Image (cartoon, rainbow, N blue to C red):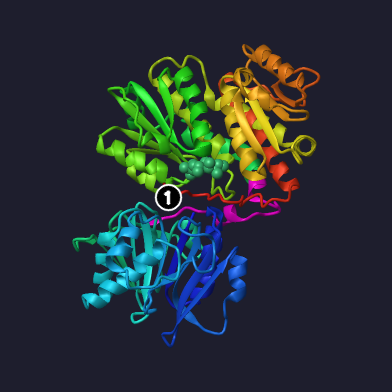
Amino acid sequence: MCGIVGYIGNQDAKSILLQGLEKLEYRGYDSSGIFVVDENKNGHLFKEKGRIADLKKIIETDTFCTVGIGHTRWATHGRPSVKNAHPHQAANHQFTLVHNGVIENFLELRETYLSDISLSSDTDTEIIVQLIAYFAEKEQSSTFEAFKKTISKLKGSYALALIDINQPDIIYAAKNKSPLLVGKGESFNAVCSDAMAMIQETNQFVELMDGELVTLTRDEVKIETQDGTIINRAPYTAEINLNDLDLGTYPYYMAKEIDEQPAVLRKIIQAYQNDLGQFQLDKDIITSLKDSDRVYIIACGTSYNAGWAGKHLLENLAHIPTEVHLSSEFGHNMPILTKKPFFIFLSQSGETADSRQVLVKINAMNFPSLTLTNVAGSTLSREADFTLLLHAGPEISVASTKAYTAQITVLAALSEAIARENGIAGDSNMAHELGIVATGMESILSEKTHIEHLATEYLRTSRNAFYIGRGVDYYVVMEAALKLKEVSYVQTEGFAAGELKHGTIALIEENTPVIAIITDKVTAGHTRGNVQEVNARGAHSLVIAMEGLEQESDQFVLPEVHPLLTPLVSVVPTQLLAYYTSLHRGNDVDKPRNLAKSVTVE
Ligand code: M6R
């Protein structure tokens, strides 16, 4: 989703901003722009629809600029176009602004204050910058006061960076709900939506809290609250390895990230095991969980799908009743909670606005919470009582793969740590079992050529597809279907295998691909029966079955792993099917249309 960068220093701001925007590309966007100020205090605005590569083509290189702001836009108000791309300017061109978020009362603000101004875009953002100009002029106030007053009128989410052309040695910034960090360096300062955007310049970042306002110069960062209280917050060191951001010899990040999964699993095992090779997690988390009567897992998209596999683990290993909820539904339609709920937020990015609005609500209710995230210092991590990191390394591809398996792995570690504490773990050793899973994943990855053939045979030209499974396989087919649809645009649904005959089987036509996952011996026979039913109606079925349950006609055999960990292996061929289908359809695998990586609006 939208990304912000801002830089004030002594180096070439244009190249630093462009580099930052390229690092934010993974979040998903449809247009981009930068505004830079040269040594003669002249402002230069460049905006383009499409990719950063297109923006680069229109940027003049003959001026040296040391201050500027940049933006990648993911359209909310108004179509993707040059006029709607950020930065936006006030009618008098004094103020230039970039914004991430959604201003809910922008129509009301326009009617109340700006009826005389003719707007040049369809965005909610333009209202903010016009309003700053309005207050600065009407009240003859300083830019900071006008900025502050404008912010006090906004309802909704925002991360903002502002330049006043009359004060080109300052960048103003502010945030509410949308992520924004300050990057600190030698003789420069920066703002950015995430640390990755500026990691090439600095690894020192200061987190900003909602409602804070920031004034950045080359040498100073002043953070204050709306009532003028000065905040002194120490920077943290962002631990991002630049090599992790490198594609290496891979054509796409999705392929690289699928391949990284065995290594990620081993990293998690190492991070959470004790000297005895058993999982041992923060005592406070375990005590708080032991004290609860139900776990509520809150998440979106792929993280939500991982939550279902997590429920399976928490209930079967730790014996804790667990519910899984979509963040966007739960926040506004909360079920009746038990007396002692414990909330687990699953979020790769740690910035998902739908999940964050739930966390804000449950914090207000004083319920304990834990975030499982890949991004240390992210909003959901900061605002929950506890955090467990996924240790997956940056996930750049919009389609989440290694975060899904990392989330399930950390939930397995957590479940076993609780079970051990409760004296019900017996001789279970999940660290050892997960090591077997990692090896199993490697053997699946060595069969990529076979899976690529299956993708071309079954999915390259099909209009729609179905995944079916039962029990834990049903949880995996929901994720398999999401993966396939988001990168290949094949309309795909994941169904409980037994449910198909209650309606959806009407959609099966000659050659409709139906992919079945079978890893559970109790339900294997039933699912095979369902495969027969669709075959009898012309389906082109593909069976992925676990070793020991396989039949000669099956198309792919999974290595056998611990029954509670089967999602970690069964999901891998489905990730590869999605990847190769997208590749052979000629799609932009890492940046599927309409999607954003970090979904920072509700
Ligand atoms: O960062 P999060 O895990 O909170 O993101 C949740 C979803 O937006 C994300 O999983 C999304 O569904 C991915 N595109 C799936 O591949």
Q: Position of residue 430 (x, y in %)?
A: 53, 24
340 drawn magenta: no
Pick the residue in front: 431 or 405: 405
Q: Is residue 278 left or right of residue 249?
A: left
Q: Is mark 1 within 8 Å of ligand 1?
A: no
Q: Is residue 151 above or below residue 578?
A: below
Pick the residue in front: 467 or 186: 467
Q: Is residue 275 visible?
A: no
The residue positioned 25% from the left and 34% from the top of the image is: 366
Residue type for callout 1: Val
Task: Give the crowd class for mark 1: few <14, some 14-19, many >=20 residues within 10 Å.
Answer: many
Q: Position of residue 442 (x, y in %)?
A: 69, 34
Rendering quarter of residue 542? top right
Q: Which residue is mark 1?
A: 601
Q: Position of residue 352 (x, y in %)?
A: 43, 45
243 drawn magenta: yes
The residue positioned 55% from the left and 21% from the top of the image is: 564
Q: Is residue 458 left or right of residue 263?
A: right
Magenta residues? 236-256
Q: How many marks?
A: 1
Q: Is residue 527 visible?
A: yes
Rendering quarter of residue 466? top right
- SS under mark 1: loop
Q: Position of residue 426 (x, y in %)?
A: 47, 14
Q: Is residue 182 left or right of residue 349?
A: left
Pick the residue in front: 398 or 133: 133
The residue positioned 62% from the left and 68% from the top of the image is: 54
